[in-house]
Amino acid sequence: MTTTSRKRTFWRGMVDGSPFLIVLAPFGALFGVVATEAGLPVFQTLAFSVVVIAGAAQFTALSLLEQEAPTIIVIATALAVNMRMAMYSAALTPYLGAAPLWQRSLIAYLTVDQSFAVCAVTFERDQTMTLAERVTYFLGVVAPVVPLWYGCTLLGALLGENLPPWFALDFALPITFIAMIAPALTTPAHIAAATTAVVASLLLVWMPFSSGIIVAGLLGMAVGAEVERRTQKAAP
Amino acid sequence: MTEANVWIVIIALGLGSFLLRFSFLGLVGDRALPDRVLRHLRYTAVAVLPALVAPLVVWPAATDGQPDPARMAAAVVTIAVGYVTKNFLAGIFSGAATLALLLWLL
């Protein structure tokens, strides 16, 4: 890959990842505010976001810490919330598994909902991408996203309660993910997978530690794979 | 909640999260995965992310878990616009506009 094409691929990743900035900025700031309000020092709040980089798990851990839950329960529950990262890792392996170990380690650290969602959709749609292009594209996606996550956590921690209450901020995250997934529903198999996952997730919401999400996701994947197998068989 | 306690959580959670993310990518590497597995993996994103979002749409934390027509409508509009236009930003903005309008009206 030449320098120009590498730059172009990196830029393309940055552009594709940038819509998430609107969502992540308030979400990161909110974590900073909530963590410092819970009594965490500013440095520790920032370290939380740098070491873990997983919003949902961070909020989970924080709320359990506030409830004085046993440390082991805090860790186990937050990790269960993050269990989907193992599935992301598996889904990225066919595209990025051949990269050198240090690159795979870096990519693993930077695998978050946003980078996975953008890359999984792009890699599937554009099968002509080379390994180097995929790695570059991935780094392009996270280049604005991850530093912003750190920065806004810090900002939130420093500003604390002075922050204005954001308008229906809670819903920025769901809308972004829905907008990401809807255009990817290109075949009956994709639609079947998503529909199954939604129904199952709503029915399994009683399962402890958000584990219903994992089960619903696995059910959706199984249904998608089965529909794909049957439609291929039906085709001549 | 002591400061040391929080550090333990941060480090354990960071390490555990890294291992979850590294698991397949690091250990399987470029060994070919069976077709059956690949076929399932193709649906990870369209299954896991909707599963993650669905409860947040139906039982939003902001309304203490009470179903909220504005949020529900915003989700439906986002799906419809995103599906029809195949455009990410069109989905986001129409969803956000729907939510803003309905929260203002209701």
Image (spheres, helix red, strand yellow):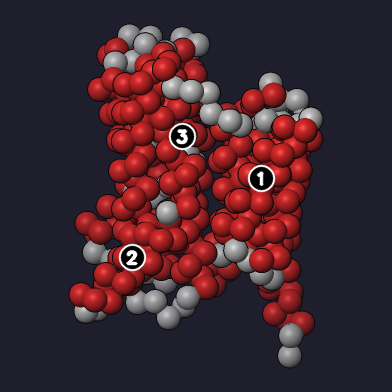
Do marks 3 and 2 share a subunit? yes
- Reading the image, the residue beneath label 3 is A26
Q: Position of residue A177 (x, y in %)?
A: 58, 49
Q: Are marks 3 and 2 in contact (CB under 8 Å)?
A: no
In the image, A126 versus B93, the foreground residue is B93
Quadrant where the N terminus of chain B sits is: top left
Location of residue B48 with respect to B59 vertically, above or below: below
> Along the horizontal axis of the image, is A142 left or right of A179?
left
Q: Residue at x 36, y 39 (%)?
A: A149
Chain letter of mark 3 equals A
The mark closer to the camera, 1 or 3, is 1
In the image, A1 versus A10, the foreground residue is A10
Location of residue A131 with respect to B92 vertically, above or below: below
- Reading the image, the residue beneath label 1 is B97
Q: Are marks 1 and 3 in contact (CB under 8 Å)?
A: no
Helix, strand or loop for disc 1: helix
Chain letter of mark 1 equals B
Q: Residue at x 58, y 30 (%)?
A: A167
Residue A181 visible in this rendered orientation of the protein = no
> Disc 1 and disc 3: Cα gap in Å?
18 Å
Res A11 label: 2
Res B56 label: none
Location of residue A118 with respect to A151 vertically, above or below: below
Quadrant where the C terminus of chain B sits is: top right
Chain letter of mark 2 equals A
